[in-house]
Amino acid sequence: MKKQIDSNRGEKIASKTQILVGEIMLDKFIDDPIISGVSLVGSESYGRLHFVRLFYYTRSEDKAKVQKRLEEITKMVRFELAGRMEQKYVPDIKFVYDDTLERANRIDKLLGSIKLD
């Protein structure tokens, strides 16, 4: 019989990973001007809990530069994460830009431009 995975467990792992990675970014990369402008805004686990997507937001205009820098530090962050997590394995992490605020602002502008009679 196939082992069932508790869906709540995935949320817990993703949330714990988000908190720990945020702490690592503050501890290790506070002097990095690109990383210091990044805020982790969400997380989700997938792939039988072996992967965690970390959603981030930045006010930087150069989103590609921020993404590249996050990809460069991912290995170091994961190594540090291994020392802070109290579980058998450490999930792989991937940083994904979250454009929710930008989409909400566009919708607000569109709604504001509608003229009611």
Image (tube, rainbow, N blue to C red):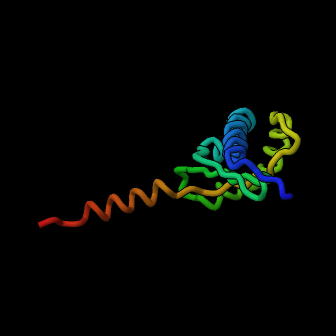
Quadrant location of the N terminus?
bottom right
Query: Hey, which quadrant is residue 80 in on the image?
Result: top right
Q: Does residue 23 appear to the left or right of 111 in the view shown? A: right
Q: Residue at x 67, y 57 (%)?
A: 67
Residue 56, position as x, y percentages in the image = 60, 50
Question: Where 43 sits versus 117, above or below?
Answer: above
Residue 100, position as x, y percentages in the image = 49, 56
Query: Hey, which quadrant is residue 40 in on the image?
Result: top right
Q: Does residue 32 appear to the left or right of 56 in the view shown? A: right
Q: Residue at x 63, y 61 (%)?
A: 64
Question: Where 32 sits versus 50, above or below?
Answer: above
Query: Hey, which quadrant is residue 95 in on the image?
Result: bottom right
Residue 7, position as x, y percentages in the image = 69, 49
Residue 50, position as x, y percentages in the image = 80, 53
Q: Does residue 11 appear to the left or right of 62 in the view shown? A: right
Q: Is residue 20 visible?
A: yes
Quadrant location of the C terminus?
bottom left
Which of the two residues, 36 or 91, is positioned nearer the viewer here?
Answer: 91
Question: Where 103 sits versus 30, above or below?
Answer: below
